[in-house]
Amino acid sequence: MRPFYRLAYHLVGIELFFHRIRIEGRENVPQGGCLIVSNHVSFMDPTTVGWAVEREIYYLGRKSLFKPPFWSWFLPICNVLPIDRDANDISGLRRIIKMLKEGHAVLIFPEGTRSPDGTIQPAEPGPGLVALKAGVPILPVRIFGTYESLSRHTKRLTFHPIRVVIGQPYLPTQVEGRRDKESFAPVAQEMMDRIAELR
């Protein structure tokens, strides 16, 4: 980990200590290029997954968040990559695929946004495109407890216990006879199915 990332990593660990966080399956985290996929129920999820996998990773953030002068400087040094969720951001997707091929780990939430009620939601097709083009292992992760700690319906943090389950990495299942574009949605939904299987 780079120095600033390591500092932020330890600060997140201090906060998660008060949630009595438990990690299961940390030994499953691979080295090299890796697409990390997780359920998404809280603003806490990115930092919680980042701390759980115990390696430096990259995150995705809406382009609208990168407002100068502070956030346009701060977010990049926190490994947050700008992505346009409301449009077909081809350049952003290409950047993510390139980073995965270069050996980095990138976290994506296939649901696209936080669950309104804490349950698993259907996947958006975009992560399927990334997975098929990058050709790196996919690491499913499921978070329990962050919804109770800080759901999208509250601004008040509660120190509810958090558990993170890290599954086995896998390569996406490709459906024969389908063109690439037709495969994106099934591959993305497979991610959510793998996440849902983690208990």
Image (cartoon, rainbow, N blue to C red):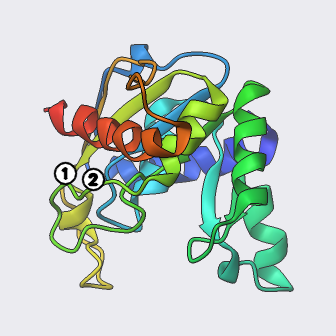
The numbered dot on residue 85 is none
Residue 142, quarter of the rendered image: top left
Residue 115, quarter of the rendered image: bottom left
* Residue located beneath label 2 in the image: 19
Q: Horizontal and vertical percent for residue 128?
A: 48, 42
Q: Is residue 66 above or below residue 21?
A: below
Q: Horizontal and vertical percent for residue 105?
A: 63, 33
Q: Horizontal and vertical percent for residue 152?
A: 29, 78
* Residue located beneath label 1 in the image: 161
**For residue 19, side relative to residue 61 (left or right):** left
**For residue 40, side relative to residue 183 (left or right):** left
Residue appearing at x 30%, y 74% in the figure: 157
Dot 2: element: loop
Residue appearing at x 84%, y 86% in the figure: 68
**For residue 101, side relative to residue 163 (left or right):** right
Sequence order check, earlier mark of 1 and 2: 2
Residue appearing at x 41%, y 13% in the figure: 27
State the residue in front, 163 or 6.
163
The three-letter amino acid code for the residue at tag 1 is: Pro
Residue 101, quarter of the rendered image: top right
